[in-house]
Image (cartoon, rainbow, N blue to C red):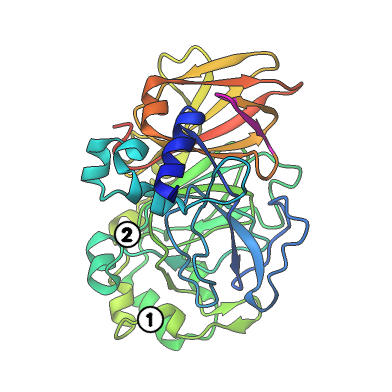
Amino acid sequence: MGQEEDLKKEIESKAGVLRLKPNFVARTFYPGLNRLGLEDADAGERGAYVERWIASCVESASPNSTPNEGLSQILLGSSGSGPLLRDGLNALPGQMLGENYARSHGNRFGALAKVLDIGYPIQWHIHARKDDAWRYWKSNPKDEAYFFLSHANSPGLVPYSHIGMHPGTTPDEVLELLKRWRDDKVLDLSPAYRLNTGEGFHVPSGVPHAPGTALTLELQEESDVYNMLQARYRGSIAPKEDMLNGLPDEEAVVKLIDWETSTDPRFYRKFHTVPEPVEGARRQESWVFQPARTKKFSGKELRVGPGKKARCSENGAHGILVWKGEGRVNASAAAAKHGLDEFFVTYGAATQGYTVKNTGNETLVLYKLFGPDVNV
């Protein structure tokens, strides 16, 4: 029996709820604080496993990545193996994503979710907007959004993010600092915002940002391209190619910035987020990534009390991360531990409905993560 037939059998036997293998990505850019539940996060010369990618069809673009790093794997039965989620979507696009969604989104899930265990703020950097991302890298842009997770060490060491720029900041000010490329003075141009557990930010592509150390659930477009804008980082000077990333000069990098949004004096009021109750939901369910902000992705937090259950019906396929507690998603055991905490809910299961049941003694908390256009 081929993998396609095995996958069909798994969809049928698990009522459309597929288990995914935990998927960790190593970075050399920054250290972690070992908040991803790994016994050993050391990746040797490749740095440390500081990111967990969820329901991912994106391969990591880091220079030190290994083949298929970042790509989620479907677990079939009790074998501990199965196809990559990306390959499963291509093999059975209608069953996995729904015929219309698969056709209009090229058989792709369309969003990338991560848990970021950042032990030191990331360098101030930018993700190009749509036209620039395609022109220079044949890539998607990368709008991204953050939700700061509850954890024993939620804040980390520096729970502040530099996002955007102070009103009145000019292209010449940024250009001068990029050309001299010897310090971290660009951070003087950018306000720092406190990162509070249970809150978040929406960061459009084209807005420079330097994420802080709060443990973060991040949802974004499927992309892994960036330009670093901060020369000095953790006591050393980054290679200038990290800033240029194939562009001809610093002027081209400065033109990647969305100046109107980045210097908006009401940036915090517009892009800081708090959970919003899902309209009409009879259970404790909130939008943590609101579809009113963007068509590119969305996400919900679901809380189910001990001994309770929730019947879930959604507009499309989605990923699930179980964050706290234990229970069942349809017939599959679910718990906040590796191997039991990540699922892909196929289109049929999502639209026909599935059950989340709490079988433990504490509140079951999980996150539903959706691709573009599902909840518009």
Q: Main secondary structure of the magenta part?
A: strand
Give the residue at mark 1: 244
| Image: magenta residue range | 329-336
Q: In the rendered image, which quarter is residue 256 located in?
A: bottom left
Amino acid type of the residue that numbered disc 1 sits on in the rendered structure: Leu
First reached walking from the N terminus: tag 2 or tag 1: 2
Mark 2 Cα within 10 Å, few/some/many (few <14, many 20+)? many
Residue at the far front: name it. Answer: 1
Q: In the rendered image, which quarter is residue 289 located in?
A: top left
Relative height, residue 202 to residue 353 (above, below): below
Question: Along the line of sight, which residue is nearer the eye, 246 or 112?
Answer: 112
Mark whose residue sits in front, 2 or 1: 2
Q: Position of residue 38 (x, y in %)?
A: 73, 55
Question: Along the line of sight, which residue is nearer the eye, 299 or 77?
Answer: 77
Q: CA distance from mark 2 to mark 1?
A: 17 Å
The reply to whether residue 354 is in sight is yes
What secondary structure is marked by label 1? helix
Picture residue at 61% right of the left edge, 73% below the top: 28
Picture residue at 37% right of the left edge, 39% below the top: 96
Q: Position of residue 351 (x, y in %)?
A: 36, 24
Q: Quadrant of the C terminus?
A: top left
- Magenta run includes residue 12: no
Question: Along the line of sight, which residue is nearer the eye, 127 or 159?
Answer: 127
Q: Which mark is drawn over residue 286?
A: none
Give the residue at mark 2: 141
Picture residue at 61% right of the left edge, 36% below the top: 322
Contact check, label 2 and label 1, Cβ < 8 Å: no
Question: Along the line of sight, which residue is nearer the eye, 156 or 350?
Answer: 350
340 relative to 97 in the view: left or right: right
Amino acid type of the residue that numbered disc 2 sits on in the rendered structure: Pro
